[in-house]
Amino acid sequence: MSLRSHWRKVLSLLSLLGGLTPTLHAQIQPATTQYMFHPQLSNPAFYGQQEGIRFAAVYRHQWAKLEGQPQTLHAAADAYLPAIKGAAGLVVANDRLGAYNNTTLQAGYTYIQDIRKKVKIGIGLNAGMVFSKLDGTQLITPQGDGSGLNDDALSNQLQKSIRPHFSVGVSVVHKWIEAGISYSNVLQSSDKLDGVNVSLRPVYGGVLQTYVSGKIKVSDDFTLKPSVLVYSDFKKVQTELSIMAGYKEYVYLGVNVRGYNKRSFESLSPIVAVMPVKNLSIIYNYDVSLNKLNAVNKGTHEISLSYLLPNKKIYKSPKIINNPRFL
């Protein structure tokens, strides 16, 4: 069975539920194995924590070789701005899954407070919109007769919906450790997708996320970077555990474990990060499925590029002119 066929049946089931109740509850948060390198994608409190203008792009191709597989693209930029005592940021994300497509546009501000120039505390807010599309031409239902879907809650036309999206977060950054807590989709808003006679109204729940990452100096040249990410929709909990070993900030090698608990073990992911030139990072990981999906997919590929333009290259110090009176 192709993944697209699987998700068509899922959408058909949702439509049947929609016939019983006009409101459905759902939770969608695209995963990223490289969370320790791009915390600003999910927590606005990490905007500007590197004191420069940072650009990042992340592409994730999940369950390769399966038709209709999830594909996610993130593009982000944030900048530390001393004039506003904080930072501004922008994140654009597109998440495709079979016939369903979500595009999220968010912009935010983070207030940053230094504590003795050793610890930075950030309080951030994101505001934006989510643009959803359901392509009815890709849907097939078991009760369809070849000329239509034969389902009152689905349409064979392209359906669109727009909903607001807000997220808040707090971060603490030190030379050797960083941590953050964020809550996304604060309003828990819903889409409206019109069928023939009934509308689907999926409600997207909020997600609480906790992130901690440290840096342990092993020697002058080698460091270890352990990280943990835990997020929950207050019904289920998902965990990410990783350990990276770095050499002189030029290259990192490590592994990430997703979803390990007493009942499941979702994936194991080797990760490599290289910095060919200063402030430029190229990161790649390959997720190996350790559940039943492993038999029908070729794993997950994820690659990202990021670049930091330090503020000292933008805000140049004024020239000093010595005055003979004070020599």
Image: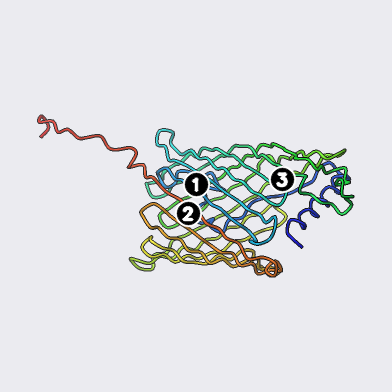
Camera-side residue of 300 and 268:
300
Quadrant of the drawing holding the C terminus: top left
Amino acid type at circle 1 is Phe
Quadrant of the drawing holding the N terminus: bottom right
**Residue at mark 1 to residue at mark 3: CA–CA distance:** 24 Å
Find numbered disc 2 in the image and state the secondary structure of the residue it sits on: strand
Check contact, mark 3 vs mark 2: CB within 8 A: no
Find numbered disc 1 in the image and state the secondary structure of the residue it sits on: helix
Residue 322: x %, y % from top left: 14, 33
Q: Residue at the spot x=69%, y=41% of the render?
A: 132
Q: Residue at the spot x=89%, y=50% of the render?
A: 145
Find numbered disc 3 in the image and state the secondary structure of the residue it sits on: strand
Check contact, mark 2 vs mark 1: CB within 8 A: yes
Give the mark nearer the N terminus: 1 vs 3.
1
Camera-side mark, 1 or 3? 3
Residue indicated by mark 1:
46
**Residue at mark 2 to residue at mark 1: CA–CA distance:** 10 Å
* Local crowd size for mark 2, using a 10 Å CA cut-off: few (<14), some (14–19), many (≥20): many
User: For residue 90, which numbered disc appears in the image?
Assistant: none
Residue indicated by mark 2:
178
Camera-side residue of 291 and 214:
291
Residue 266: x %, y % from top left: 65, 66
Residue 153: x %, y % from top left: 85, 43
Residue indicated by mark 3:
204
Give the mark nearer the N terminus: 2 vs 1.
1
Camera-side residue of 230 and 127:
127
* Local crowd size for mark 1, using a 10 Å CA cut-off: few (<14), some (14–19), many (≥20): many
